[in-house]
Image (cartoon, rainbow, N blue to C red):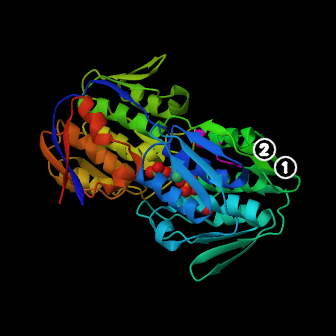
Amino acid sequence: MDRFVIEGGTPLSGEVEVGGSKNASLPALAACLLAEGESSIGNVPFLKDVETLRRILEQLGMKARRDSEGRITCRVEDEEPVTAPYELVKTMRASICVLGPLVAKRGRARVSQPGGCVIGPRPIDLHLKGLVALGAEIRVEKGYIVAEADRLVGTRIYLGGPNGPTVLGTATTMTAATLADGETVIEHAACEPEIEDLAELLVKMGASIEGAGTHRIRVRGVRTLRGVRHDVIPDRIEAATFLMAGAATGGEILARGAVADHLDAVLDGLRAAAVNIIEEPNGLRVRPDGRPGPVDVTTMPYPGFPTDVQAQMTAVLAVADCESTVTDKVFPDRFMHTDELNRMGAKIAREGASIRVHGVEALEGAEVQASDLRASAALVIAGLAARGETTIHRIYHLDRGYEKLEWKLQRLGADIRRESD
Ligand code: EPU
């Protein structure tokens, strides 16, 4: 198993290129199951999760080839297979994004039921609710969700859950509705940029979709969709992670390609913590001026502060001047990183549904263990800011969602290396 060894305490500086969005690439590639002919999805990051989905799609009869530029060309060659197997789905919950396209296009899907998740409960009831409302019959058979429908029929669906809208549940329902008879209205839809990007891809394919990016999405079913060329949006979470690394280390970084419009809440949070952020034509620049200040952060569905940046922001606040509070309203127990940050000298305590972060002047390097993707990113940020050496074990989590992370950080002046057992 690989680990990162970081010699911290040096401010990062320079320019870094933000890659394509993982969370836009996954549903976009799955949506290619809907299309006749060849599709080509560009700006796809080279990540473990993308490779997992590519393997699932190949098992589902799609030829999917990646070129050196990060473009995946795909074409369905066999429409018979409908099974997304346990061996692959168990390694990535987002595999569920093949469910909607399969039912809509092939009339049947058999997708292994995703298991537990370290960031908290991850039910899929809303995905199933959307498909049932469209007329699919659903049962669970030996750990597999089996969804069947001779034809889907458009309807009005309320998709809100206890913690707000669901991103991939909206993707499931929206993709399934593209080939349904008649009109579907999704109320309380997720309005994340990744959903807007998916809708843009589907519209290029010939779908009729209005309102993506708002809480009401209207889909008029069409008979067929065609293969197209599409580039996914830049990864707003990767961009935010670099901004946080600058803020925590006191270094000036330009995140090239970062889209300010996708990051309003993050920029607002950083500015509230007295971190200078400058919007430039080709990206976002963080220019810290001393230690960050305290700020209270509450994550919410988009356009709120993203849960996927909560851990990284916590790492910044761990070295802020004074006390901050962090609450996660999307995944209320997503605080696995706090114990590891405390091992580095942070002062973070759970208090009801929130954590209280008492900023310290400096963190100390330590051996820590990554528990999930974004928690790992928080540990990297903490390690870069800390005095001395930090070893982060189990960094395979990072390889799921950050492309060439250590290489990009090295180019910003970080002393970080990967070691293998
Ligand atoms: N929820 C339900 N029922 C459902 C689905 C979700 O109650 O059927 C709840 C969840 O438990 C959670 C909330 O709704 O409390 C939001 O979950 P959502 O469905 O939006 O999450 P997701 O679509 O499965 C995507 C990202 C996650 C990100 C969340 C929230 C992808 C591939 N994954 O997951 O990204 O945290 O939205 O923004 O897009 C990551 O990249 O590290 C990551 C975990």
Which residue, as the protein is rendered here, is positioned at the far bottom?
Answer: 142
Instruction: Specify the quadrant that holds the N terminus.
Output: bottom left
The Cα–Cα distance between marks 2 and 1, rounded to whole angstroms, is 6 Å
How far from the left and from the top, in percent, is residue 179?
80, 54
Amino acid type at mark 2: Ala
| Magenta region | 188-195
Is disc 2 surrounded by few (<14), some (14 to 19) or many (20+) residues within 10 Å? many
Residue at position x 17%, y 40% in the image: 386
Front residue (pair 205, 153):
205
How far from the left and from the top, in percent, is residue 93?
51, 62
Left or right of 395 in this view: 332: right
Residue at position x 41%, y 54% in the image: 48
Which residue, as the protein is rendered here, is positioned at the far right?
Answer: 182
Instruction: Specify the quadrant that holds the C terminus.
Output: bottom left
The answer to whether the residues at label 2 and label 1 have Cβ atoms under 8 Å apart is yes
Residue 191 drawn in magenta: yes
Secondary structure that dominates the magenta span: loop
User: Tag on residue 222?
Assistant: 1
- Residue 214 visible from this viewpoint: no
Front residue (pair 337, 124):
124
Residue 194 lies, with reference to residue 182, above or below; the image says above
Residue at position x 34%, y 50% in the image: 398
Left or right of 62 in this view: 288: left
- Taking the image as four quarters, which one is ligand 1 found in? bottom right
User: Quadrant of the rendered structure where residue 249 is?
Assistant: top left
Which residue is under mark 2? 207
Residue 109 lies, with reference to residue 254, above or below; the image says below
Amino acid type at mark 1: Val
